Image (tube, rainbow, N blue to C red):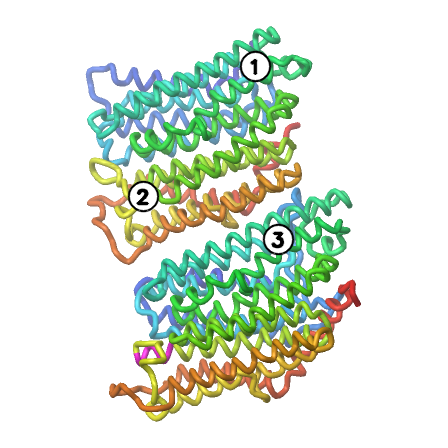
Amino acid sequence: MRLADLISLIPYLLLATGGLTLLMMGIGPKRVSTRRLTNVALVFLLLGAATTLLWEAPREVGGLLVADSISRLFTPFFMLSATAIVMLSTSYEPLRGEVREEYLSLILFATLGMILLVSSHNLVNAFIGLEILAIPLYALIAWRPERDGAIEGGVKYAILAGFSVAFFLYGVALIYAATGTLDLAALGAEPTSKHLLPVAVTLILVGIGFKLALVPFHMWAPDIYQAAPSPITALFASIAKAAALVFLIRLLCLQLPHIWEVLLPLLWGLALISMVAGNLLALHQQNLKRLLAYSSIAHLGYILVALAAGNSLGQDAAFYYAVAYTAMNLGVFAVVAALALPDHDRENLKDYQGLGRRYPIVGFTMGICLLALAGLPPTAGFMAKLLAFGAAIEAGHIMLAVIAGINTAFAFFYYLRIIMVFYSDKTTDINATPPAQGTHAVLIIVSLFVIGLGIFPEWLLESIKMP
Amino acid sequence: MTYWLSVLIFLPLLGGLWIGLTGHSRATYVRWAALTVTGVELLIALFLWWGATPGEGGYLYILRIPWIPAMGIQFLLGMDGISLLLILLTALLGPVAVLASWNAVHHNWSAFAATLLATQAGIMGVFLSLDLVLFYVFWELMLVPMYFLIGLWGHERRLYAAYKFFLFTVTGSLLMLIAILGLYFLHGEQTGIYTFDYFALLHTDLPDKTGMWLMLGFFVAFAVKIPLFPLHSWLPDAHTEAPTAGSIFLAGLLLKTGTYGLLRFCLPLFPEASADFASIGMALGVIGILYGALLALVQEDMKRLIAYSSISHLGFVVFGIYAWNQESLNGAILLMLAHGVTTGAMFALVGMLEERSGTRLLARLGGLLSPLPRLAVMLLFFTLSAMGMPGLANFIGEFLVLAGVFQISPGLAIAGAMGIIAGVVYLLWMYQRAMLGETNNDQTWVDLNRREILALGLLAIVVLWLGLYPAPFLDSLRIPVTALIESNPGQ
């Protein structure tokens, strides 16, 4: 193993040791303060993000991992988002005193799973990443099990994620049966005549589709979004989904373009039903977390509109959308976490009345992120939609683009409704403690990122260019 | 000098942001700050008018800064005669809107001023941008603050009106976005240059059917804004529920962005498709004129009445645009200005009347001429202008439009003239019911104060100027209108 290989592995090693270190800190007889635990977790995450700067991209490590421009972008991005999640968790009222060794190490492990997934160069490695990502989430969803629906949510997610992984594994097995290799580069060189390959990739797509909550695999999403503590909802609504998405884009667009072309009609259909169903279900939803769950289903639909185009613009659009989507969702769920009551999240929209006026920074972030989700310029959400619709039009999918446009227009209705509630004249009972400094920092950074990415999309589009 | 174009956009935007952040619960400071910003904006616009020298293609100023080179998106602003006049109108209505809402807005003045200024910035951007993505950005950007103006400071059914306004317009504009992208790729495939630059896209070779579809994509967005029958139903609600300043901006400026879009994009970008479409466009215009006038006849609410009269007047503008000759285009643009000033003033007056009487219903008004002489005179002045009294603003526009249309189809011109007659009926009737007759209310009345007279006086001067000596305005329209006529394939 050469030194450069080792350097490429440092972020993964750091996260694994970070998770273990946190667990070890709990063994000693003396109780370690929560603050110190959090700091340790943050240091490992930030160090991990920083070491990706040392990478010599593109580089393949042992046929398992690849450090190319995609993983170089998303690895630090996921780690920085994970630091945001940690900061949200520590000041999240319902989990006060519960964010200890186990919780933090599980977040670190989940992040490890994500970065393994996005940089995997081998299907088995991707499977391992997917599982390392999923298993901590079962526990995190049900954290503080005496909460309403916590256990139910955890079990539901465990069962459904198990199903989806079975599909994924079946697909992997079929690929091995058809070609005799699991290496992505080798798969890309396979001739197109093998009919088993599209079937296998479709099965993988089903497995990933569960993770992404595409219609018709979306049933779990609103329940789990509602059941999980808000910082955890933020985690799997933003980065966990983005990780699965990036893996899917890498698999389809970069490694298996010929299979991508075969699957375009399927992606077309999934895009159509995901955005239509997501928006229709969100239209009259009164529970904010469920509403956001449906909205993210619709957003995955827009991303598939870009992927279904089957051109290089569509691929860029999907990557850009993945980043924008992560940031926007992180922002809205951070707001939900920041406004949580002492023992539970605010559920119904009317519990948020007037809070935007009361807490200006929270209201500002909510406004920016919701307008970005709605696709309003000059935010990242607009640029993402511009690229996605552009890809569809370039591919000649005018009908799909028009439907996506009309869907976007309808989505404005419920996003604006939320903003109106946040700024309504009446104010509900406010929190005893205002949102913490750390939460405010997360909110401000996320909203600046959402605007900055929208005004300067070049930066991202350049960095995902394949050499 | 060209950088002043971006100042026009960013001054109100940043000024609004500053006021929004610093002005919490300091209403007096906020009012004066907003007035200063809009006043400076007006001075800059006048300065640009004064310093204008026509350059290449009739453009007075062009500002070109690369923004996203990879996709051919630029920060491209340009001002020709048409946009110059609309910029002046926008800058003029800014201080008027601030003055009109001086005491009418009771809560959250800082947020109100911020949204108002943001709306103004968005409208400025729409009139200036010549890059299609940039245009779309501003097109959406003016929508959101307008939505909040209606939704947060409006009257009883404000939320319903705000949603309706937003959903109509945003659906239209998303269809336009798709048409923009379609044009972009078509142009890119033909020439290999992928750009959203208006000047480059002007010479795209469009296949017949595609050109028509793309034109319709743009047309729908503009038709919703104008609004043309049958996409008009958001307008009466939005106008009725909006606060006074919102109504002034909505009627005076937002509706003009639609007709401006037709002039700037629909006709020059898709000349063949627009020529084929012209007869339908004129028919839609004449339907708008008559339909708006007929509905205005039966309105009880003054704001609703003026809203329907706007549909009627904007029908004239569309009528003139699609007649597509020298007189009608000049007339249409002058009418846009005249309508902006007149209707802005009338909404301001209704707002002032409502502050005093607490109602906008004609049945509960009446006999206010003697207790409120100044207000009554002002209302009479602008009412006369709105119904096309010679010597006042609207007359020239309507006359030129009818003269232009008459050359193409006398029948349609006669139908349009019927709209003017109906206009006289409903406007005079409105005035009679509101101001003349017996008073049925014996509260103590306070006539217009100096602030209100200043706001209305500014507009009255412009009305007289437009009506008596429109030559300077027509002068700046000469080159752009000639270019528009040259692009007509039928000529």
Q: Residues within 10 Å of mark 1 (few under 14, many from 20)?
A: some
Co-location on one chain, circles 2 and 1: yes
- Which residue was labeled with disc 3? B217
Q: Position of residue A463 (x, y in %)?
A: 59, 33
Q: Nearer the viewer, residue B205 or A243?
A: B205
Are dots 1 and 3 in contact, CB under 8 Å?
A: no
- Which residue was labeled with disc 2? A286
Chain hosting mark 3: B
Q: CA distance from mark 2 to mark 1?
A: 48 Å
Q: Residues within 10 Å of mark 2 (few under 14, many from 20)?
A: some
Q: Nearer the viewer, residue B177 or B117?
A: B177
Residue A31, above or below A274: above
Q: Quadrant of the C terminus of chain B?
A: bottom right
Q: Is disc 3 placed on a helix, strand or loop?
A: helix
Give the extent of the magenta segment: B351-357
Q: Residues within 10 Å of mark 3 (few under 14, many from 20)?
A: many
Residue name at image x 62 percent, y 21 percent: A259
